[in-house]
Image (tube, grey):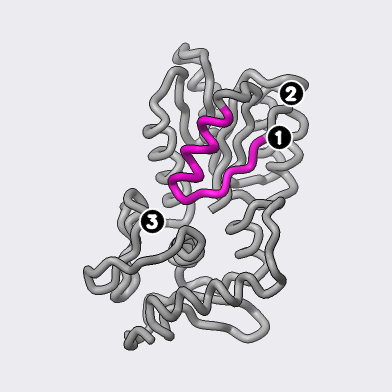
Amino acid sequence: MRILVVEDDERVAKSICSALELAGFVAVHETDGEEGWYLGSSEPFDAIILDLGLPTLDGLTILKRWRRENVITPVLILTARGNWDERVEGIDAGADDYLVKPYRTEELVARTRALVRRAAGHAAPLIRLGELTLDTRQMRVSRNGQPVPLTPQEYRLVSYLMHQCDRVVDQMELTQHLYDQDFERESNSVEVLVGRARRKLGKNSIQTRRGFGYIMETTSESDPVQ
């Protein structure tokens, strides 16, 4: 899951990005309002954390632009201003959630998880798919109640596909949502990652649609772990 953080305070941004990465997200940080608007308009993200007080372009203007451009990515607004009328203005402009500074980082991460989950059509923090259960709070995948030992990158892959269950996800989309732009990877990184996850979850857990991508289906039959 890839999160855009538009925050001009480097200390605050570093804290947010570190917390998001510990929670299994890929965090992309931008300090400038214009650049933040451009990234949110041109690149795919699963959620955006947006500060209101930004240089060159304020957060509320950015949000209104995104919504006029039909950018539907869920947005969590951060602000030091706690007036109720400003919160209403932000929600009316298209924000999905609002957090007033100072806040606990744990709450920020929890709200981000909820935004990503709801955007994918899942209300509860536990996502179940046949024998598999994804616990988004604990960053854990289990099969028939038994924890599956996934690496952080394997977890990100399975989490993304389970959030997008019953939809074919192509390799480009997986690459965009699983890796930081600066991360050096081989051309077959996604294929290798899928293969490793299958060996742990079962060979039928992730289906390949030749020429299209990968899918985790609610109707997948169980199979023994290889």
- What secondary structure is found at the residue carrying circle 1? helix
Decide: is 223 above or below 177.
below
Query: If you read the primary sequence from the N terminus, does the residue marked by circle 1 or circle 2 appear first?
Result: 1
Amino acid type shown at disc 1: Gly
What is the C-alpha distance between the residues marked 2 and 3? Answer: 33 Å
Residue 160 horizontal/vertical position (percent): 49, 61
Residue at 58% over, 46% down: 73
Decide: is 73 above or below 100.
below
Range covered by the magenta-colored residues = 13-29
Tell me the residue that label 2 is attached to: 57
Query: If you read the primary sequence from the N terminus, does the residue marked by circle 3 or circle 1 appear first?
Result: 1
Q: Is residue 178 magenta?
A: no
Q: In which quadrant of the rendered view does residue 29 lie?
A: top right
Tell me the residue that label 3 is attached to: 122
Whether tag 1 and tag 2 are in contact, CB under 8 A, the answer is yes
Residue 43 horizontal/vertical position (percent): 71, 50
- What secondary structure is found at the residue carrying circle 3? loop
What is the C-alpha distance between the residues marked 3 and 1? Answer: 27 Å
Residue at 61% over, 49% down: 45
Tell me the residue that label 1 is attached to: 36
